[in-house]
Amino acid sequence: MTKKEAAILVKTGYLLQLLIITSAVLFLCPGSSEGGTILLKKIRTVPAGRCPKGIAMSPDGKYAAVTNLEGGNVLFYDTKTGKPVKKIQFTITRGTGFDYQQKKRIPSFREKPVECIFSKDGKWLFISLHNDCGIAAFAMENGRLDFPSLKKAAVIDLVTGEKYACDIPYIRTGITPKVMTFSPDGKYLYVSNWHSGNISVIETDSLKKLYDFWDLKQPRGISYYSRENYILAANFNADYITVLDTRKRTSAYLIRTGKNPRHIIQGADEDTFFVSLASKGYVAKINMAKRKITGMAKVGNSPRTIAITYDGQYLFSANYYDNTVSVVDTSTMKQTGCYTAGVHPCGLCITTDNKELWVTNYLSNDITIFRIQGKHHF
């Protein structure tokens, strides 16, 4: 731990907790660099903004976008150097937030970016705004001003120092928007809304909301099942995922997963999906053709975001309360190693060349970058 990290923890009262958690991790994960064909080597730690959450790679692999929840901004990093090169700083306005520990509404501000996703052509970055009941659509090349609802922001070039005002299109979705995913053709964007229990469907060309799926239980993770044109939605306040039919615009069926399913991703083949189970410390493997769980991997305490190598052989899990990242062999659904990240790892993403894993650390306000080493197909 650096002196800076220790100072942060002392100031926030988390130092004793970290010492206890670190001891547990060392006991649970001895020799974390052994036992698997995939190894993670920590190559650098780079500073982020206040409370980094989501992270997304641009399709061309040049940039990593990181949402900083309490900073009200998004940072863009050059993936070659690991240095921030651009910032979107939202204009802050008063709003109402939510205390997840005490489970109550609290005074806050509206423009809290929580997750982000690039459009398939890389021309847009969509950003969910936790306290603002909607998402922002930032044009990577040219700003778009002919839109009925806009968010005020400043865009700062961190290399040259140039700064300009920017109006960013805003689309209202639901209360506490979280994760977003695209249809395979990129024509539709799906947004999960935690507190209003709905998933919004947005047409990407017009940036207009078309309709909603309702009656979900705190939906967070979502993923698209292209074989059936279904959306898989993780109900965090339940023990199942809901399978939504995009053609009939209704719920098709449920799949029991275990308590608190949080994040869903697709595997290498069309029918395989994985879901993190936050309260149980597991990652479940789902076979959609069979409509059931076919494997469970024990990982760390409170797995948050998960990601998978492009060949589907290995999965990574950000374990929030253990301050670790797990590596899982997806063929055996066994953890083959775990590695120390920063304090409260939350989001993670693999670079487009499949060579690095970037992990956002919510409490230490930084990003851990690992090199992915071992036998797997790039």
Image (cartoon, grey):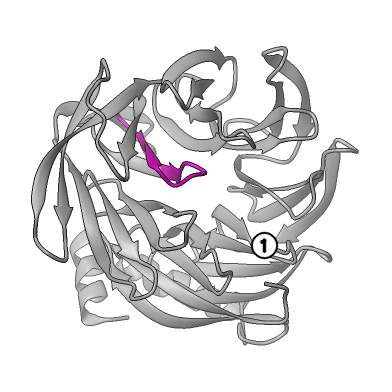
Q: Quadrant of the N terminus?
A: bottom left
Q: Is residue 371 above or below residue 55?
A: below
Q: Position of residue 156 (x, y in %)?
A: 15, 52
Q: Nearer the viewer, residue 131 or 149?
A: 149
Residue 190 in which image quadrant: top right
At a point 35% along the width and 57% down the height, the residue shown is 362
Write the start and end of the magenta stretch as one range: 116-131
Q: Nearer the viewer, residue 51 or 375?
A: 375
At a point 65% along the width and 70% down the height, the residue shown is 327
Please indicate, yes or no, whether residue 369 appears anywhere in the rendered image: yes
Residue type highlighted by circle 1: Tyr
Left or right: where 183 falls relative to 143: right
**Residue at image mark 1:** 310
Q: Position of residue 188 (x, y in %)?
A: 55, 27
- Image mark count: 1
Residue located farthest toward the front when viewing the structure as drawn: 142
Q: Is residue 234 above or below residue 304?
A: above
Q: Is residue 148 magenta?
A: no
Left or right: where 104 falls relative to 333: left
Q: Position of residue 39 (x, y in %)?
A: 62, 81
Please indicate, yes or no, whether residue 132 appears anywhere in the rendered image: no
Q: Nearer the viewer, residue 292 or 148?
A: 148
Q: Is residue 28 above or below residue 279?
A: below
Q: Nearer the viewer, residue 294 or 24?
A: 294
Left or right: where 226 falls relative to 347: right
Q: Quadrant of the C terminus?
A: bottom right
Residue located farthest toward the right when viewing the structure as drawn: 290
Q: Secondary structure at mark 1?
A: loop
Q: Position of residue 62 (x, y in %)?
A: 40, 63
Q: Residues within 10 Å of mark 1 (few under 14, many from 20)?
A: some
At a point 27% along the width and 62% down the height, the residue shown is 48
